[in-house]
Structure formats: C-alpha cells, structure tokens
C-alpha cells in the first residue's frame, strides 16, 4: 500500500499530512463504508482539531452524518464504534513526536480495518474517485458526550475488580499528556487502587516527555514510583493503545517481558498467539511451555489483526496477540489494543501473586539477551546486494527460515532476523537468546554475511 502503513497514515502535520489529504481519505472511507453515520475522534495533538474538521467535512461531502467524539483514547473509539454500530476516522499519530499527526480507520465492530479494506479505500484516494452527495444529502454533524464514560464502565466490567481492589495496590500512571489522561487514572482509581500521576494533563505539545513510552522518556515515572513506594508504574503512548511498566524500584520492564508474562497467564494447550516476525524468544518459550502455536506476521498492528481474524474464522482460539512494544491484544475482549486494559490485566497478575513485587512476577521472562545492529547502505542497488547476501547466508544455515518479513532463522533456543528498515536506509539485524554470547555471535555472523554483499 502506498498510503497506509502497518498502522494507518502518519507524517509531519501540514507538510506530509495536509487537510486536503485528510479530506480525501475521509471521502474515500465514507464511500467504501457506505454508512449513514461515521464517528470522528482525535488525540491531544495541537493539529488534531484541524484534521478532525477536515475529516468531518469529507465524510459529510459523501453523505455521512458525523458523530464528533472529541479527545478520546483510541480504545474508547473502538468501544463507541462497537456499541453504536458505526465506523470511525481517528486523528492520531500514536507515539510519534508532537509535530506528527495521522489517521486510523476503525470499522463498525470497533476494530482497525483489515488490509483488503484499506486497499480499497487507498485506491479511491489514488484514483480521486468518491461518491459525492448533492446539497440535499450532505451529512450533518452532532457532538457526542459520554464516550469516555461508557468506555470506562465497560472496561471495569471486563476485569476482576474485586481481586485488584483486594490487592491494595498503589499505581503510578504516566499518560504522557496524551489521550489516556482523560481515562486511565480514573480507571485505576475505580478498580480500587491508590493512583499517583505524572504528565497527566492533556497537552499536544507533550511538555513533560515525548509520547513514545520507552525507557529514556520515563524518568519522571521511574522517580515517582521509587520515591512513593508505589507497587507499579504504568505508561501510555499518545493515543493510549499501549501500556508499558516499571517495577517497584522504578526499573523499566521490557515490553517483550510483560507480553510474555501476560501471555503465560492466559494460554492453554492448542491455543495460538499471533505476533510479528521480530517476536522475542521469551514468547517463543512461553508458547512452547503451554503447548500453544505461535503465528508470525509482518511487523505492524494491521497485519496482526488480519491474521488473528483469519485464525478465528478457522476456529482457532487466540487469547492474546501483539508486539513487544506494549501493544498487546486480548481478542476475547476486543481485537484492538487498549492501554488501560493491558494495564488492568497486569494488575490482575500482581493481585494473583500474593504480594510478590513486579520484579519477581516478571523474573521468569526477563533473563534474555537481545542484540540489535544496523548496516547502512546508499541506494536501492546496494540495498538489494546486501539483501541478496543475506538470502544466500540464510539458505545455507542449519535452521528453517521464515520469510514473512525479511529473513528470520529460529534455532529453538535463539533466533536472528535480518530485514530492511521501512523508514531509513538501513538493513536491521536482530538476535536474541538466553545466552548472551550466542545472541552476540548470531548477530555478528549475520552482519558479516550481509556486509559481504558490498
């Protein structure tokens, strides 16, 4: 796809992403959906209102009435779509810096659109082909109140509130000035936790920290947890569809580690887990321990959603899916990422641990060594030569390759992946093992093989 990537459209606002482009995307989506009503929502970014207005105009131009939800978390949009039976245009750039904005499209089942539907919408934009309404059939706009309230209520009903409340947890929450600011602190309080907050005022400039919840951006949260004797810290990205954690000492819990812990708690023999091709050995081992299958997709939420749907149609139970960046799906709840719900499921783990701290709960999944390396190139010809060398190395390796997205070699107790970056002129190499020397050796051997193509 030319416009839609692995998780919608994103770009620098008013440069790549313009009101005209958003208008066309909304017209195309409204044309393909052929719906009477469509919701429009946004996160806290400063350009959000501008683009939400453009989206509403585009939808009205093809005859759709528009429900304006305002600033709400992405999972609250999914809840509204599912309960009201309407699709949505969501203006958000998720974890990207404040100068970015983007568009996600959500179906009337509350789930981001599958690849085939996105391709139909994209084709309409590229062909400049829309079903414009005449003046008598232009859509009307209605402000909608209560979308966040309804989302909070349904989430609380979906988890074990009694167990979480009985655990008497103190939770530090860092919404990063994003859409989670209007929901997550409230959710954890209503689950019976004492809640402390930092960076919890909605502000699209992200003054306290950058939107992506990675260790270098979570110093405030780590200090809050360590100095307040909180049991756990929970951080979100800009649109609140991800959650990552810090332990009782303020130490960052790797997203692959929390994903593995959450998966281990809900897998049964015969289940399947869907994740991307850069999946951690932690999850590989958890699936093996639970006699569950692991299905790998190209990197990106859209691909994970599409494969999970396919498995459901085949009668396969998928209780958990996602990636190691804090974006975990619990398909029986909803086939969309929900940062506050991910956090609540983690609180259930703590409640079941009989007072054990976070560091102890995640310890079985944290003793792994991950290596990342990059090989830079200049131009498509050199890139192709480097990838050709990687392919030759993979074909002679004593492991079965997975070519879903690049080349991944699984050795049972370790893996190595080589793939071109989608955003930079680099070949990326990843390796992981419980044995640090083995991970380093796998990455180095692959790097030498790739560079032999120069």
Image (cartoon, helix red, strand yellow):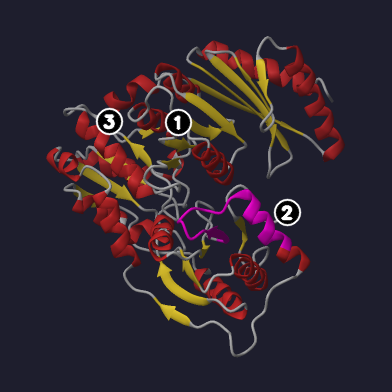
Q: Nearer the viewer, mark 2 or mark 3?
A: 2
Q: Which mark is residue 256?
A: 1
Q: CA distance from mark 1 to mark 3?
A: 15 Å
Q: Secondary structure at mark 1?
A: helix
Position of 330 with respect to 424 (left or right) is: left
The residue wearing badge 2 is 2
Q: Which mark is residue 437?
A: none
Region of the chain picked out in magenta, as a range: 99-123
Residue at the bottom extreme of this rendering: 136
Question: What is the x, y in percent for residue 435?
Answer: 50, 12
Look at the numbered discs 1 and 3 and tell me whether their residues touch, using CB distance below 8 Å: no
Total count of labels = 3
Question: What is the x, y in percent for residue 102?
Answer: 57, 60
In terms of depth relative to the viewer, which is nearer, 84 or 450?
A: 84
Q: Which comes before the other along the chain, label 1 or label 3?
A: 1
Q: Nearer the viewer, mark 2 or mark 1?
A: 2
The residue wearing badge 3 is 358
């Amino acid at each position: 796809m030319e416009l839609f990537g692995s998780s919608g459209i994103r770009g620098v606002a008013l440069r790549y992403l313009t009101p005209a482009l958003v208008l066309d995307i909304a017209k195309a989506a409204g044309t393909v959906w052929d719906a009477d009503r469509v919701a429009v929502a946004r996160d806290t970014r400063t350009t959000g209102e501008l683009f939400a207005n453009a989206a509403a105009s585009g939808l009205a131009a093809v005859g759709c009435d528009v429900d304006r939800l305002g600033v709400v978390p992405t999972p609250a949009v999914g809840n509204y779509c599912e309960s009201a039976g309407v699709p949505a245009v969501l203006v958000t750039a998720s974890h990207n810096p404040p100068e970015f904005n983007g568009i996600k499209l959500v179906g009337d089942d509350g789930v981001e659109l599958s690849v085939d539907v996105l391709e139909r919408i994209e084709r309409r934009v590229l062909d400049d082909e829309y079903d414009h309404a005449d003046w008598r059939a232009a859509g009307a706009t209605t402000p909608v109140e209560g979308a966040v309230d309804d989302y909070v209520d349904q989430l609380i009903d979906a988890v074990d509130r009694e167990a979480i409340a009985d655990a008497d947890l103190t939770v530090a929450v860092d919404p990063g000035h994003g859409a989670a600011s209007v929901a997550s602190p409230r959710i954890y309080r209503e689950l019976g936790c004492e809640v402390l907050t930092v960076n919890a005022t909605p502000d699209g400039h992200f003054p306290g920290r950058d939107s992506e919840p990675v260790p270098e951006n979570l110093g405030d949260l780590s200090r809050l947890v360590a100095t307040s004797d909180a049991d756990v810290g929970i951080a979100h990205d800009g649109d609140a569809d991800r959650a990552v954690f810090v332990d009782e000492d303020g130490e960052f819990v790797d997203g692959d580690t929390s994903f593995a812990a959450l998966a281990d708690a809900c897998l049964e023999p015969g289940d399947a887990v869907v994740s991307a091709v850069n999946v951690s050995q932690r999850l590989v081992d958890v699936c093996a321990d639970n006699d569950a299958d692991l299905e790998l997709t190209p990197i990106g939420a859209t691909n994970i959603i599409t494969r999970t749907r396919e498995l459901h149609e085949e009668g396969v139970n998928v209780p958990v899916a996602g990636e190691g960046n804090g974006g975990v799906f619990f398909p029986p709840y909803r086939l969309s990422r929900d940062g506050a719900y991910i956090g609540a499921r983690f609180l259930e783990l703590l409640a079941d641990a009989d007072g054990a701290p976070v560091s102890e709960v995640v310890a079985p999944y944290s003793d792994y060594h991950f290596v990342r390396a990059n090989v830079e190139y200049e131009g498509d010809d050199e890139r192709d030569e480097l990838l050709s060398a990687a392919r030759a190395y993979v074909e002679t390796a004593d492991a079965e390759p997975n070519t879903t997205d690049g080349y991944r070699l699984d050795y049972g107790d370790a893996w190595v992946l080589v793939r071109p970056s989608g955003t930079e002129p680099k070949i990326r190499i990843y390796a992981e093992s419980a044995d640090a020397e083995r991970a380093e050796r796998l990455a180095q051997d692959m790097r030498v093989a790739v560079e032999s193509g120069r």
